[in-house]
Each structure stands twice: as C-alpha cells, then as structure tokens.
Amino acid sequence: MENKPTDDEYWIKRIPIDPSAFEVIYDRYLLQVYRYIYRKVGNQAEAEDLTSIVFLHALEGILKGQYASRNKFLAWLFSIVRIKTADHFRERKRMPIVSFDDELEPTDGHEITPGDLRGLSKCYSGLSSSEQELLALRFSADLDFKTIALILHKNTAAVKMATYRSLDKLRKRMEGSDE
Amino acid sequence: MNKKDSGEELTKAEEEWFHSPKVRNEFQVDLRNRLIHFQKNIPSNEISREKQKGWNLFKWPFMGHLNPSKLAGGGLSLLLALVLLSGVVYAVSQYAGYIPGLGIVNQDSPLRILSSVQTQTKEGIQLKIVSALASQKNTSIIYSLKGIPSNLYEGNAPLDPSPDKQRCSDGSKQGLRGGIRLVLPDGQRFDALGSGSLGYGQENDYQKVIFFGELPENVNSATFEMDCIEGALPGAAPENWSIPMTLKENLEDLKTFPVLKRVETNIQRDNQATIVVSDLIPFKDQYIVLGKYIPENQDKEIVISGIDLNGKVSFTDVNGDPLQYNIPGDLQFYSQEDKSRFVYIIDAKPASFPIDLQIAGISYYCGGSIPYTVQLSDFPANNEIHRVDKNIEIGGCKTKLVSIVNNGPTLSLMFETEGHKVTGVNIRDVNDPKSIQTTISKNFGTAVNVQMSAANLMKDHQMQLMIDGIGLSPLQPLSARLELKDYQ
C-alpha cells in the first residue's frame, strides 16, 4: 500500500545546483497536485492559479532550505497545497463549487454517461468537508494512507477506515440518487 | 500511481471523475517556464547557506571555479587571460570559435569589441557593461549588477500567482520583450533576443550575457538601456538604466576555443527521428556539445515550437559510467534561436570517448489549421461510433482522426499517431470561440481522445472543427554516439 520509493531526495538536493532538477519533481507531481486542487475549487482557472502558487512556493521553500522533512517530500508538498487552498478560500470567502460543466473528460469506453459524473459531483458535494478531503487526497491526488496520515497528523489506520467509510457513503448516496 | 485495496477499487465512472480533468498542455509548459524563470532570478542571498555551497559547484564554462565578481571586474582582458592560462592552446584559424561568456563567433568576419568598461551607479547599485562583441551574426554583451540590497525583493507576496506580471522580468516592468535594448545614435532600437546567466556572486551580484541582432557595420556607438532590475518589484529599485558604450575594431588576435565540426554528415536514420551532435568544443576538462533534434520527415518543414528535454538526458563514457553535465549559460542563445537545438557541457576528457548521449522525453508541437466538418447524419444514433480514418498532416506531422463518437452533449474524437506518443491535441469549434479543447494524453500512448461540446452539431446539424495542432513525442529515447575522430 505504500507509494513506490522515489528518488525525490536526490533531485531535491540537486535543485540549488541544477535548475533542471525541480522539473523532475514538477513533472512527477503536477498531475496529483492539480487534480486535488481541481477537486477542491471545481474550475480550471482557479485550479491552474493555485497549482502555480503551490509549485512556486515549494521551489522557493526548497531553495531557502525550508524543506527539512527528509523522505517525506510528498507530505510536505501537500501541506503546502492544503494551506494555499485554504488561503484561497479565505480570500474568496466562499465555499468550493464543483462545476460539472467544466468536466467533459475523454473516456476510452462509452459506458460512462454525463449523468454518472453529474451524480458523483452532486453526491460528493453532499459529503462533509473532512470526507471530501480524504477522498480527494486518496483518489484525486493518489496518495497512500501513510502520507495522508502525515498530512492530517492522524493515525494511518484511522485514516484508512475513515476513507473507506467516506467512499462507502459516497456510493450509498449515488445509489440513493439513482432510485 | 498508488495501488488501491480491493475494498476501495473504484468503478470506471468514479475513477474518471476523481482523475479528471487533464492538465492543459499550455499551462503545464507555461508553469514550467515560470518556475525556471523564478529559480534563475531568486536572489542568491535567499538560497539557504547549506544549499549555497551548491552554487560553487556550478561548472559554467565561463565561470569555472572562479569567483564571478572577480571576473566581472576584469572584463574581456581577464577572459582572454583565463583562456591562455588554461594551458589549452588551440589554433585560431578556425571558421568558428567559442569565446567564453560571449558565445560562438565566425572568425572570418570582422569583430568589434567594447572600447572600455562602462558603469552606472544608482543608489549604491552598480550596473557594469563588462564586455561586448559585435559580429556579422549577432551582438553579445555581458553586464553585471552589484550592490543589490538584500531587501530588494521584499515587499509584495513573493509567491504571487503571476509573479512575472509584478516583478521585473527580462528587464521589463511589464514582463514584455524590449526591457533590455540597444539604442543607436539614429534612434534605431535593437531589443534583446535572448540571454543567459553567467552565475551569481557572493552577495546579490550576478552576471548575464544578453544577445542582440547584428549591428550596422558603420555604427560603433550605442546606448545600453534596461528598464528595471530583474526580479525587483516596481519602484523597489532604481529604474531606467542607460549606459552609453562604444565599440572598436578588434585589432588583437582574439583567442578562442575552436569549434570542431562533425565530419561525417551522412546520417543513416531510415527516416527515423534522431539527434545529431554537430559541434564539439573542447574546453579545459570539459566538452561543450551542440546538437540538434531532427524529426523523421525533415523535408516537410515541421514547425517545432519547442523541445522539452525534461532533464531526461544522460551522457555515458567509454566505460558506461555517467558523465556530469550542465547547460552553459553563455550558449543558451544557441538553443533559444532554434528550439530544436540543444547544448550541454559535460565533464569529459579525450579518454572518455566514445561518449553515448541519450535524450528521452523530447516532445514537439506541430501547429497548423486543418478544417474538418462533422455532419449530424454521420451519427444515426447516440453513442454510435463514426469511423473516420482520415489521415491528417498538420505542421508537417502526420496523425489520424480515427473516430468520432456523438453521445448527445459531447463529441469524443480519437486521434492516433503511429510511432509516437500523442502528448496533446488542440481543436476548436469554429463557431464557438470558447470551445478550444486541449487534451493531454493521460498515459502518453499513441492515441488520445478529445471531447468537446456537440451543441452546435445538434443545433445546425453540422459543425466546423479546426484542428490547430498536435503534440508528439518519439516512442523511444533518442541516442547518439560521439567519437572524437568524427569531429575536426
């Protein structure tokens, strides 16, 4: 259940002496960061702005020696993601809006209908913020439970259980909406 | 990605939803460029002490292991002295020569250099024109800045989402081109075409080389102008710098490092994409490698808008051991002029050859305007696959529009390109300016699906699409073997 071991630490050490090193980190985690943020803010423009802020902050933090959490880079990065996302909502003084209309995504099969996706958006929005958070970290950001536990300062087993419960609740709501 | 427990296996719809949307290709590239720019311009005193040691490890060809600020003080004469003291003596009867810090020049044409070092000081900050070289091809100028106060970069939030719009970028307050320029006595203006970092000093000092176009032969004076100091917030530092400078004929025997050209130019590649190292420059215990990416249909004039090397580059010596490499700041212009070019400096000696170079992750974008009309009658029923199988050539790149599915609100178009990963497609509905769709392939396979609204198709029974471009990447890393005997 652990993420594969990475050579993050190697590249992070190289960043001050090799400007291309951060690109490796950027390419590695852009998608995870972006997906999580998109799930929170619900639209492309804000997701891109926030993703930019996060990576700029992470790069600056590494250059200034603020990253000291050896072998916990992903947790450190997502701490920044969460802080910046929270700041964003504080500034905008509004709750996240999940907009299905921006989510016309390619599928390789054709069995998924827009109704499925719209239903998911609606049911997800109905979950509590902590349930949404767990699901976004686990399934949009693809983080393992250990990393999520580090980010949330909670026990790994408790995080795992809570995630299962949240997913179960989402599915039950979906079933309910089908009826 | 992270493996899931059986209890949390997602349905296809759930997975699609949690994993959406794709990152726009333009955004991905733009943010990468901004991060590179940000890192280049972060003041050296803000780099942590532990990490700052790293800067000294930089092996810029120009800087070597010397203190950059000393180089700034010495001007071109010191540069020449360094070349001579390096113990490497080369014949100067080469057509092209490498002058550390200033780039590659054609020695057959007349060269002009800076008459004397010029400085301007404002509020304790000194801008110095260290050296200049005007050739028939272009003009390069090295400038240094010293005395920058450490609080210069303080002020607004340092992590503004659009730092380039607020901070001085490329010498411009608005982040536009033209922030650094040469102005001739007749008012003619030459905007900077490119630049390269030559390193940072112990304080906030730094040195850059700026490239301009070719100056008229009869003009020997110009004014170097710079609107603002890189990275500074508006009003935080002296602005509108202006230094008059004069050029003189280079009457000295300007010593250079020879540029060795590849002798064997007949490349066996069976119409496959390849990389070719065209030039080698021996430089102390290093070699500078200048090369070019050549797409498979070279004769079709593919428009390459950019090559993303992604840092996935390796050099290995004759024993298969990895060689350290870097990007030389004073030759960045070589790759800025033509996006299909690359330049590296590697720690290698003659005994290291043959050297194997491998580059993965090359990607390029082929732009154009290919119209395609979709008819509602192509889809008698929802979710029916309309098989198109139309070969498309766009910007010299070949792809195929395989099929279109109309599932009511959306159209799903599948593109496939043989022998390449499809990294993205740009497509739009001509009658809906907001319809531009960019899709980045999730798994970087040979096929990609693009979805867009079918509203106009349902309303007008037909829809005019415009395919604006496709991003491709060779399936396999490209490699080249460098043998010393192939270069002279």
Image (cartoon, coloured by chain):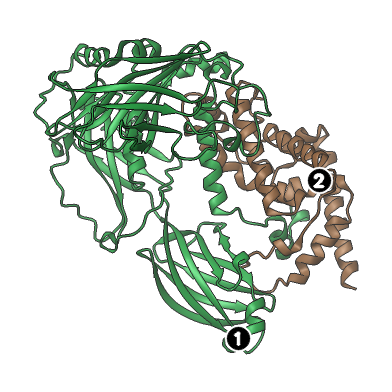
Chain colours: A brown, B green
Element under disc 1: helix
Task: Name the side, left or right, on which B312 lies relative to B73.
Answer: right
Which residue occupies 85% across, 43% down?
A: A93
User: Numbered disc 1: what chain?
Assistant: B
Residue B303 x, y percent position in the rendering? 36, 57
Residue B65 seen = no
Which residue occupies 38% across, 15% down?
A: B119
Tell us which disc is closer to us: 2 or 1.
Answer: 1
The crowding category of the residue bearing disc 2, from other C-alpha atoms within 10 Å (few below 14, some 14 to 19, many at least 20), is many
Residue A133 marker: 2
The crowding category of the residue bearing disc 1, from other C-alpha atoms within 10 Å (few below 14, some 14 to 19, many at least 20), is some
Along the line of sight, which residue is nearer the eye, B166 or B389?
A: B166
Residue B35 x, y percent position in the rendering? 54, 36
Task: Name the side, left or right, on which A58 lies relative to A20.
Answer: right
In which quadrant is the C terminus of chain B drawn? Answer: top left
Q: Amino acid at mark 1?
A: Leu
Q: Are marks 2 and 1 in contact (CB under 8 Å)?
A: no
Task: Name the side, left or right, on which B435 lies relative to B39.
Answer: right
Residue B327 x, y percent position in the rendering? 37, 31
Please count the marks in the image. 2
Residue B259 marker: none
Q: Does B104 sit above or below residue A97?
A: above
User: Numbered disc 2: what chain?
Assistant: A
Which residue occupies 49% across, 60% down?
A: B445
Q: Amino acid at mark 2?
A: Glu
State whether discs 2 and 1 lie on one chain: no
Residue B376 marker: 1
Residue B53 x, y percent position in the rendering? 49, 14
